[in-house]
Image (spheres, rainbow, N blue to C red):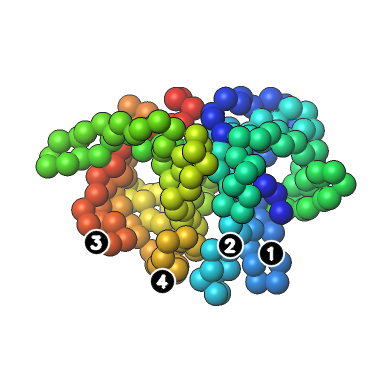
């Protein structure tokens, strides 16, 4: 399994040859593994849709230089002690396949999308509307909630890289059309009963921020504002 990544410090290099951005997957005996790369941030998650089972996730910043993928772990549910460590992989992308080699161990991933969409990127929640007023979120220390979107897939993760704590994650596929953002949940670490559900929200991009409103999975009213992790 790919293990992965901490602070947002990397910039893309060498993408002309190995443009890794987008979503990739492996299928192993009913277990699905998905890699997301967007805006210099990535995640790797394993789960089973049929069994509604979340297995593991890890992620953080990444950099591609030539044929070398460097990742810096910001969260890892399987090997918490690796948070903060840097790892390197030799990669090659040909014919819609990503080959990754670390120490002679190779995996071959198939491309799901190329990461091109107006919502594609790595986002962090920055504000919420409460009592009709948008209030900035001032998170303590290194605690944060990030959301990675490629062309077709999403994943959010509530993490604290500084303490290596992990609070939860969920993800799957999404669509965004005519101001309507819809998530189709394929895994949810806190509550497997939500797997298979679809949630729709109103969404808009305004001054570089993503405004996201509607009903949460619990039926509560939400209005959230997300900014790009990279500050673009």
Category of crowding for the residue at label 1, using alpha-carbon neighbours closer than 10 angstroms: few (below 14), some (14–19), many (at least 20):
few
Residue 165, position in %: x, y? 48, 45
Q: Which residue is mark 3?
A: 219
Q: Residue at x 53, y 46 (%)?
A: 151
Q: Which mark is residue 27?
A: 1
Q: Which residue is mark 4?
A: 193
To which quarter of the image does residue 225 belong? top left
Distance between the Cα atoms at labels 4 and 3?
Answer: 15 Å
Category of crowding for the residue at label 3, using alpha-carbon neighbours closer than 10 angstroms: few (below 14), some (14–19), many (at least 20):
few
The secondary structure type at the circle numbered 4 is helix
Residue 5, position in %: x, y? 61, 39
Distance between the Cα atoms at labels 2 and 4?
Answer: 15 Å
User: Which residue is situated farthest in the bottom direction here?
Assistant: 51
Distance between the Cα atoms at labels 1 and 3?
Answer: 33 Å
The secondary structure type at the circle numbered 3 is loop
Q: Which mark is residue 55?
A: 2
Tell me: residue 153, above or below residue 85.
below
Mark 2 or mark 4, earlier in chain: 2
Labels 1 and 3 touching (C-beta < 8 A): no
């Amino acid at each position: 399994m790919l293990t992965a990544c901490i602070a947002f410090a990397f910039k893309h290099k060498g993408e002309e040859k190995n443009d890794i951005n987008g979503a990739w997957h492996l299928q192993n005996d009913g277990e699905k593994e998905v890699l997301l790369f967007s805006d210099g941030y990535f995640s790797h998650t394993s789960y089973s849709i049929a069994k509604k089972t979340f297995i593991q996730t890890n992620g953080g910043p990444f950099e591609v230089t030539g044929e070398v993928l460097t990742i810096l772990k910001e969260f890892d549910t399987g090997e918490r002690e690796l948070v903060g460590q840097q790892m390197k992989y030799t990669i090659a992308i040909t014919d819609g396949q990503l080959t990754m080699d670390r120490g002679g161990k190779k995996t071959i991933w198939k491309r799901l999308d190329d990461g091109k969409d107006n919502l594609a990127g790595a986002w962090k929640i920055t504000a919420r509307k409460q009592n009709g007023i948008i209030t900035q979120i001032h998170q303590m220390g290194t605690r944060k909630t990030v959301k990675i979107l490629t062309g077709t897939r999403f994943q959010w993760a509530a993490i604290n890289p500084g303490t290596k704590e992990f609070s939860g994650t969920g993800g799957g596929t999404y669509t965004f059309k005519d101001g309507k953002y819809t998530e189709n949940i394929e895994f949810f670490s806190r509550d497997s009963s939500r797997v298979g559900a679809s949630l729709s929200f109103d969404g808009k991009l305004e001054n570089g921020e993503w405004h996201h409103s509607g009903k949460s999975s619990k039926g509560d009213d939400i209005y959230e504002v997300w900014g790009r992790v990279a500050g673009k």
